[in-house]
Image: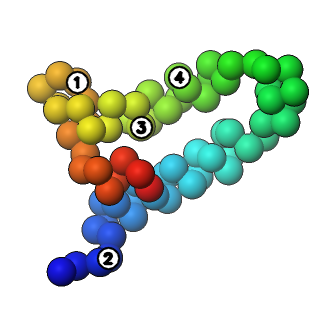
Amino acid sequence: MQFQLTEEQLMIQAAARDFAQNDCKPGVIERDEHQKFPAEQVKKLGELGFLGMMVDPKYGGGGMDAISYVL
């Protein structure tokens, strides 16, 4: 049984970490205090392919596995 992430999973993990640090973290307190919906960040999540990761590609999704989804 393999307990290591695949190369693809590691790349997804790094991209998610980078997005969180560079796009979500700046301004998070202000957005929270003003209860502002992070529309720009959600749009970018879609552009990066993080929305619909587990949806079958024939329906426009990423076709990723459950492990990649929770990274």
What's the coloring here?
rainbow
The residue type indicated by label 1 comes to Gly
The residue type indicated by label 3 comes to Phe
Earlier-in-chain disc, 2 versus 1: 2
* Rendering coords of residue 36 (x, y %): 76, 19
* Rendering coords of residue 44 (x, y %): 53, 29
Residue under numbered circle 2: 4
Nearest the viewer among 14 and 63 is 63
Disc 2 vs disc 4: which is toward the camera? Answer: 2
Q: Residue at x 40, y 31 (%)?
A: 51
Q: Residue 14 shows which numbered tag? A: none
Q: Residue at x 62, y 47 (%)?
A: 20
Q: Residue 43 shows which numbered tag? A: 4
Q: Residue 50 shows which numbered tag? A: 3
Q: Answer whether labels 2 and 3 touch (C-beta < 8 Å).
A: no
User: Quick one: SS at disc 4?
Assistant: helix
Q: Is residue 56 left or right of residue 43?
A: left
The residue type indicated by label 4 comes to Lys
Work out which residue is located at the far left of the displayed protein and give it.
58
Residues at marks 2 and 1, CA–CA distance in whole angstroms = 28 Å
* Rendering coords of residue 57 (x, y %): 17, 31
Earlier-in-chain disc, 2 versus 3: 2
Residues at marks 3 and 4, CA–CA distance in whole angstroms = 10 Å
